[in-house]
Image (spheres, rainbow, N blue to C red):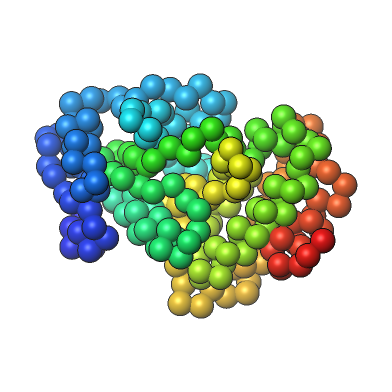
């Protein structure tokens, strides 16, 4: 673990066997909250989001898991801590750039043999819902949030960040229907983000919307793709 890099972001590190806890000084009680519990918080009950748990006061705990084919083999076991540290750095940077993403207040690691299990603790976005759930409930209100989401992705790219796992469930809307980006363990900062990666990112997100529409889970509004691109390019109505 790169302790110097973590401390340079304003976090502190404490070992409380069998865990190592990284926490923000604004929450000095966090190490004690994280130390003695093998399972943190309570299940959200959200379909497809079993690794997300609520924890008081106003915190969300996410257990990092592999995606794709590795998910069934390794599940929550990782050979390095890179994913959690990547998320910590990406979150701090995007917040510094004014990008709406939940503040990460802590991490918890535990090593079992050669593998690490990792949990990320962030502040809760009150009264929030992911974009997929919103489009399920309010298909007629989709155009405005799709446009706003395009603008959010544009701002992320302007900050020279590529989110390799950008899809509809990684966009969360607050009570004002402002989109936030979450799950940054696959986000990478570039000196100058190449056009091909910007294109790949937007195409991946558009494909995500198409997939759920094709499955009948949501009903996208007419002209939604153009609406998204207008938000992304900054065009007015």
Which residue is located at x 61 percent, y 42 percent? Answer: 176
User: Does 110 appear above or below 94?
Assistant: above
The quadrant holding residue 75 is: top left
Whether residue 75 appears in this view of the structure is: no
Which residue is located at x 57 percent, y 75 percent? Answer: 194
Which residue is located at x 58 percent, y 38 percent? Answer: 175
Q: Where in the figure is residue 38, as x and y percent of width and height?
A: 25, 25
Between 142 and 166, the residue placed more toward the observer is 142
The quadrant holding residue 43 is: top left
Residue 147 relative to residue 104: left or right = right
Whether residue 136 appears in this view of the structure is: yes
Which residue is located at x 13 percent, y 44 percent? Answer: 14
Residue 160 relative to residue 135: left or right = left
The quadrant holding residue 150 is: bottom right
Between 85 and 125, the residue placed more toward the observer is 125
Q: Where in the figure is residue 233, as x and y percent of width and height?
A: 71, 68
């Amino acid at each position: 673990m790169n302790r110097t890099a973590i401390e340079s972001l304003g976090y502190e590190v404490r070992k409380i066997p069998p865990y190592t806890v990284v926490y923000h000084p604004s929450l000095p009680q966090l190490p004690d909250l994280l130390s003695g519990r093998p399972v943190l918080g309570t299940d959200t009950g959200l379909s497809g989001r079993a690794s997300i748990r609520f924890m008081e006061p106003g915190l969300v705990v996410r257990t990092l898991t592999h995606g794709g084919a590795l998910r069934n083999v390794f599940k929550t076991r990782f050979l390095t801590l890179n994913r959690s540290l990547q998320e910590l750095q990406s979150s701090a940077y995007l917040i510094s750039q004014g990008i709406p993403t939940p503040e990460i207040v802590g991490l918890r690691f535990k090593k079992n043999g050669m593998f690490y299990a990792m949990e990320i603790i962030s502040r809760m976005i009150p009264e929030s819902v992911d974009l997929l759930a919103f489009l399920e409930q309010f298909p007629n209100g989709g155009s405005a949030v799709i446009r706003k989401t395009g603008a959010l992705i544009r701002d992320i790219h302007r900050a020279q960040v590529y989110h390799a796992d950008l899809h509809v469930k990684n966009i969360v809307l607050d009570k004002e229907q402002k989109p936030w980006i979450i799950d940054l363990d696959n986000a990478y900062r570039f000196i100058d983000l190449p056009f091909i990666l910007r294109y790949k990112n937007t195409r991946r997100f558009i494909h995500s919307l198409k997939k759920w529409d094709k499955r009948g889970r949501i009903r996208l509004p007419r002209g939604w793709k153009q609406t998204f691109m207008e938000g992304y390019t900054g065009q007015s109505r």
